[in-house]
Image: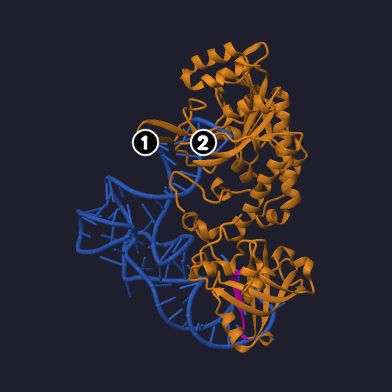
Amino acid sequence: MRWCPASTPAARARRSIRRCGSGRGRTGRTGRLRRMDAATRISDLPGAIGRTVTVHGWLTHLRSSGKIAFLQVRDGTGFVQAVLPANAVDEATFAAARAFDQESALVLVGEVVADARAKGGVELRLSGVERIAPGGAYPITPKEHGVEFLAERRHLHLRHRGPWAIMRVRDTVIRGVHDFFAERGFLRFDAPFFMPTAVEGTTNLFEIDLFGEDSAYLSQSGQLYAEAGALAYGAVYTFGPTFRAEKSKTRRHLLEFWMIEPEVAWLEHEGNMALMEELVAYLARRVLDERRDELAALDRDPRVLEATAEGGFPRLSYDRALELVAERGERLEWGDDFGAPHETILGDLHDRPVLIDGWPTETKAFYMEPLDGDPTRVKAADLIAPEGYGELIGGSQRIHDLELLERRIAEHGLPREAFEWYVDLRRHGSVPHSGFGMGLERLLAWFTGAKHLREVIPFPRMLTRLTP
RNA sequence: UCGGCGGUAGCUCAGUGGUAGAGCGAUCGGCUGUUAACCGAUUGGUCGUAGGUUCGAAUCCUACCCGCCGAGCCA
């Protein structure tokens, strides 16, 4: 059931461009629309060689001489070069085409031809071209631009090759996550975004005013709710936005990002680490299978992903990691957490992500299960990416013992009332369970080789940028 | 919050006390296979803001604003 705009002139114009509803007779009344219905996607052109097709797209670049013009065209599915010899159309059409500006919206008709001189090996020999809308002094020219300039025009920059490739990898990773968990019988389980308090007391939260009566906070994790879900449905995962009110200004941080949090009942630490590895390897494989061209467009060497897709992630104990960091001149005390430079050192030891476990209890969150016979350590594991992209995943087995959990909440000085329902889970059929949180943008930045997390989300939210 | 770097034409930058520059873009013209095409011409400025030093400031000084990178925190 789709909403159909009222019959205003603007609505009619919209309807002539976009199909609306299912009434073909109603919407198919203009010649233009019939042509649009028959459009071929640029991504399908290699299979259409020899045929005359219609392409709907936008002009990214134009080169012309007096007798021939080359139109670089994108349609969202790909890029293609359209060739317009002067003698293929009438004089007025050729003159008009030579004057098309960047981002002109075009309907192009031509024969699909294999030609080694064109990028991609296929080009469109035009027999007709019509401009639907002008590009209008488009600001992003095919030259260098600064970070700030492009950020202000993010709504336009998304059209360009780099963001195009990244967003397609992002789509594949998101679909891959859902497929991965669906294939394994996980239930997609949505956690709330408004929270009464912090999941972990440490990080800063965005406060929401509830009509002056009360405060809520934007979620920094769905984990506690996922635990309820795991004990209800066995295996669940959340996939939603996450908010961190941290004044971080680095390439590894956003105020708002997307997190995937699986949680599984009866799953213990070892199995949890295996699940992390399986997920990341699966996603790397999926991107290699579906987005080779996009990786190439990003100049991303696929070998990084190929190693990762094999699985077999190296494992390091916290103690061993401390030694390795010290060997490289970064001495830390036992009980210190690793900072960004240390994570970079550890991540670069191998050609694929590294798992670190055996963490000191005091470095980790209150809900983590202690190691058997060693209360100074917890059953937690972090997955660190190579190339300085930092922590991709943090996870642990959760405390299932009622008394221990109550004690930890008290030790951490947390408000007991807010956690009452969470504690209550331990009163009714409590079993060992584990889970982790994976940062979508961290993973994507690493997969695509992005310089900054802001490149891998459509509209990044940062300390210094809320628009567009 | 702290530390480093930066703000000059639409864009990317050069210019460190003496007439404000280049490349690209845009506009006009030329060119039948271009790949960020090429050739010629034209167009282009509150040098972040305010104050100060100086005969003279984009340049030196002070304050402020904005951004980038990093630290802490974390995904």
**Residue A65 part of the magenta segment:** yes
Residue A383 in view, yes or no: yes
Of residues A231 and A387, the one drawn nearer to the viewer in this rendering: A231
> Given the image, what chain letter belongs to the residue carrying mark 2?
A
Q: Which chain is orange?
A: A
Above or below: residue A220 compared with residue B68: above
Q: Are marks 2 and 1 on the same chain?
A: yes
Q: Where residue A313 sits in the image (x, y, percent)?
A: 73, 33
Task: State the separation of the CA atoms marked 2 and 1.
Answer: 17 Å
Which residue is rendered at x = 44% and y = 43% of the image?
A: A463
Q: Residues within 10 Å of mark 1 (few under 14, many from 20)?
A: few
Name the residue beneath numbered marker 1. Answer: A211
Q: Which chain is blue?
A: B
| Residue type (three-letter) at the residue carrying disc 2 | Phe
Above or below: residue A201 compared with residue A260: above
Above or below: residue B55 compared with residue A269: below
- Where residue A435 sits, quadrant-wise, is top right
**Residue A264 part of the magenta segment:** no
Q: Which quadrant is the N terminus of chain A positioned in? A: bottom right
Name the residue beneath numbered marker 2. Answer: A193
Of residues A135 and A327, the one drawn nearer to the viewer in this rendering: A135
- Where residue A123 sits, quadrant-wise, is bottom right
- Where residue A101 sits, quadrant-wise, is bottom right
Which residue is rendered at x = 67% and y = 70% of the image?
A: A55
Which segment did they paint magenta?
A: A58-66
Q: Identify the mark nearer the N-term, 2 or 1.
A: 2
